[in-house]
Image (cartoon, rainbow, N blue to C red):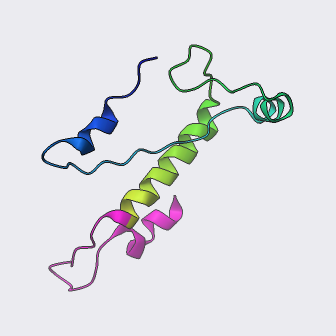
Amino acid sequence: MGGEDYAEYGRTEAKTPIFMFALGAVRPEAFKESEQTGKPLPMLHSPLWAPLPEPSIKTGVTAMTAAVLELMPKKENAQSGATGGLWETGVARAL
């Protein structure tokens, strides 16, 4: 595989900020076998890459949502003067 061009975005004249997020998504048995044998696990673009869908998607959505909520600037609620972010309303904690 040649590689991702996404990493080049941050190297442009505009210095666009980037963030790459890696998520482990392999069956626990395959991970254990890899640790024991030293055989590398298939990477993202491999035809052998086969993540467990449900826990991988749930973990990815939860982790990426938490990262965005943490990194985004908080805005004041114009009507009440209170912050109205998802953390304050409890929505993010429910994730």
Residue name at image x 27 percent, y 73 percent: 74
Residue 6 locus on image (x, y percent):
32, 34
Please give the count of numbered marks on the rendered protein: 0
Q: Main secondary structure of the magenta part?
A: loop
Residue 86 locus on image (x, y percent):
37, 67
On the rendered structure, is 41 left or right of 36? Answer: left
Residue 33, quarter of the rendered image: top right
Residue 50 locus on image (x, y percent):
62, 22
Residue 28, quarter of the rendered image: top right
Residue name at image x 19 percent, y 49 percent: 15
Residue 12, quarter of the rendered image: top left
Of all residues shown, which one is farthest toward the right? 36
Taking the magenta stretch, the answer to whether it contains residue 88 is yes
On the rendered structure, is 15 left or right of 88? Answer: left
Q: Which residues are magenta?
A: 71-95
Taking the magenta stretch, the answer to whether it contains residue 12 is no
51 w.r.t. 1: above or below: below
38 w.r.t. 85: above or below: above
